[in-house]
Image (cartoon, rainbow, N blue to C red):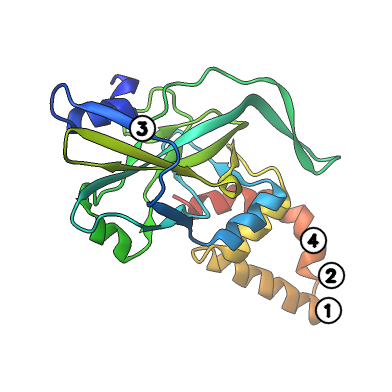
Amino acid sequence: MNHSSFSIDSILARKAPAKRKISHEESPKLIRVFLQSSSLWRRFHSLGTEMIVTKSGRRMFPTLSVIISGLDPVKNYVVMVDLECIELKRFRYSFHQSKWISTGPGESELPSRMFVHSDSPARGAHWMRAPVSFDKMKLTNNQLDNNGHIIVNSMHKYRPRVHIIEQGGEAQTRHSFSFEETEFIAVTAYQNHRITSLKIESNPFAKGFRECEVQGMEMGNLGVGTGSFQSVFPLIFPYFAANLANVEK
């Protein structure tokens, strides 16, 4: 399948009548988009957010969800997301420095695919009624993916961009929004154990991992073993890193 068939321009071309002019507005004055769960995103950002990618596709956590205001209630809009590769470098995690560092030029990027929200197109009143979640969006490192997942390169940094396409009239206008705190490094396995801990703590689908932590602490308090769960976490971290990815399928 042609990779360009998932690009924003090809999607717009399919939805727009022939010879329709497409304009781009970089700084919309009325339409506003707010990042939901921004405090959680900032916690991850402060540590260096990592997102697992696989050949079959993996969902993001935290989930990208936004609140939209300022739309015309009766006009139709298409809402979609793509990923912008920023810095165009390859990164690696330095365990000694506890941070991500660049290691040189990044790999070539395919044209960015778009994830179109399943409610598209819909009236502005619909989009403003409740938060708009992109929880079904998946990331893959399969360069030949034909499932419509967003293709990324491992160990590269990306930032999601939300696009709102206003339909009708002689032109379609694209409003684009992005948030610095949603930047992440694409990885095939978590590198920073603090990211793993935060995902276990904040992901509602990671209940089993949190229960294991509580049980480990209780065993430590009862004198079972040599210490609390926290003291042995570095030893069992590979187990959590390998299994937490299954929670995000």
Q: For the residues marked 2 and 1, what is the alpha-carbon distance in whole angstroms?
A: 8 Å
Q: Nearer the viewer, residue 163 or 209?
A: 163
* Picture coordinates of residue 100, whole percent (x, y): 74, 37
View extreme (left): residue: 17
Mark 4–mark 2 CB contact (< 8 Å) = yes
Mark linked to residue 3: none
Residue 207 higher or lower than 109, as above or below? below
Amino acid type, callout 2: Gly
Mark sitting earlier along the chain (4/1): 1
Please report the residue visible at 57 percent of the width from the left and 53 percent of the height from the top. 244
Assess disc 2: are there few (<14), some (14-19) or many (≥20) residues with their C-alpha within 10 Å of its C-alpha. some
Q: Which residue is mark 1?
A: 223
Q: Which residue is mark 2?
A: 227
Q: Mark yes or no: residue 226 visible.
A: yes
Q: For the residues marked 2 and 3, what is the alpha-carbon distance in whole angstroms?
A: 59 Å
Q: Which residue is mark 3?
A: 24
Looking at the image, is mark 2 or mark 3 nearer the viewer? 3
Residue 193 higher or lower than 40, as above or below? above
Q: Nearer the viewer, residue 175 or 244?
A: 175
Local secondary structure at mark 1: loop
